[in-house]
Image (cartoon, grey):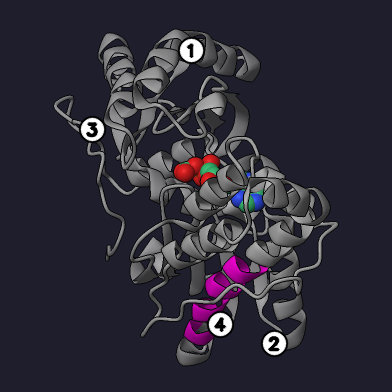
Amino acid sequence: MALRRDIILGIETSCDDTAAAVLTEGRLASSVVSSQTEHDRFGGVVPELASRSHERAIIPIVEAALSEAGVDKGDLGAIAVTHGPGLAGSLLVGLSFAKGLAAALDIPVVGVNHLEGHLYSLHLTDPAPETPYLCLIVSGGHTQLMRVDRGFEHRLLGRTRDDAAGEAFDKVAKMLGLGYPGGPDIDRLARRGDPAFHRFPRTRLQGYDMSFSGIKTSMLYYLNEFDEDERRAHLQSHLPDLCASFQEAVIDMLVDPMRRAATDTGIRTLAVAGGVSANSALRERFDTLADETGAAVHFPEAAFRTDNAAMIAAAGRAAILAGRTSPLTLTVNPSLSFSSHG
Ligand code: KG4
Ligand code: ZN
């Protein structure tokens, strides 16, 4: 389908970030993200607070994205919006807003799968990975290994059977008395810790599936060996070591299936997307893998690793150019899967 104007507004509200971005002829003109902080003291996202906060933020964030891009809303050619997976109430705020604006402007709206958005985060900056490539999508809600072929055909190779890797970071951070989301804190502390301080068991499954609930339990058992005073003293002297040891185990469990899939398929272009791709040790591990095997390794640019709307606009634009838009009856799908296409 031809766009009346190739100017796309992307909207993302699937979890606790309210984000809007503008793509003009495929080039990013603006990307604005507002991260909610009211969940920090609860150690996790409170759905009811998240949707109310999206309601307050959506108009100012969209206006900021339009004004930063120097675009009037009347200039827009289409709106791309996340319709799943995510929190129902949060998704509903973005989708309702997008549909209302699209109807008022008489332009198409296209629903985007949040995980497909994460894949597109790799295509916002050059060089994008060349197909075929393997991509780990690792976020707070999902952990899956995909194969991406020409024309963006993709196939699920493996996924976590329980917790997402980001969720393990967040839950372990909470056990260690760190803030939410815990991934960035663990990453920062682990830089001055010893990854060999304690060897947490690695779960290895058949095929390319993964599991991260075991490591969470192992950390719990480890900490429960101490009484309260001992634990406090132990954390005081060894918090960075525990962060590094935990992080090392998670990275092993993420890299192992990817490495096996690369050997089995002969694919030598590897990519990582989603919030956990911001992890510095994961990046270093992949750089080492690239040096050892000659594989090409791609990570999204820093601003596009955690949730953003630029990736949603990019995925939406590709869908529209391939002839797909959504009816105004489009609804949210909190458990929308991202497995096979093409
Ligand atoms: O993709 P994302 O922003 O939201 C979801 O779609 O879930 O990912 C958020 C997740 C959180 O679990 C957060 O702790 C994790 O990404 N994360 C990190 C880092 N930065 C964010 N995990 C490890 N190291 C980091 N530097
Ligand atoms: Zn995400």
Tell me if mark 4 has few (under 14), some (14-19) or many (20+) residues whose alpha carbon lies within 10 angstroms of its own. Answer: some
Q: The residue under label 3 is which amino acid type? A: Val
> Given the current orientation, which residue lies at the most extreme right position?
192
Residue 277 % position (x, y):
61, 55
Badge 1 marks a residue whose secondary structure is helix
How many numbered discs, if any? 4
Image quadrant assignment for residue 76: top left
**Residue that numbered label 1 is attached to:** 57
Disc marking residue 332: 3
Q: Is residue 300 visible?
A: no
**Residue that numbered label 4 is attached to:** 259
Mark 3 Cβ inside 8 Å of ligand 1: no
Residue 98 % position (x, y):
33, 20
Tell me if mark 2 has few (under 14), some (14-19) or many (20+) residues whose alpha carbon lies within 10 angstroms of its own. Answer: few
Badge 3 marks a residue whose secondary structure is loop
**Nearest to N terminus: mark 3 or mark 1:** 1
Image position of 266 with respect to 182: above or below: below
Helix, strand or loop for the magenta stretch, by majority: helix
Q: Is residue 4 magenta?
A: no
- Which residue is pictured at 51% across the width and 72% down the height? 133
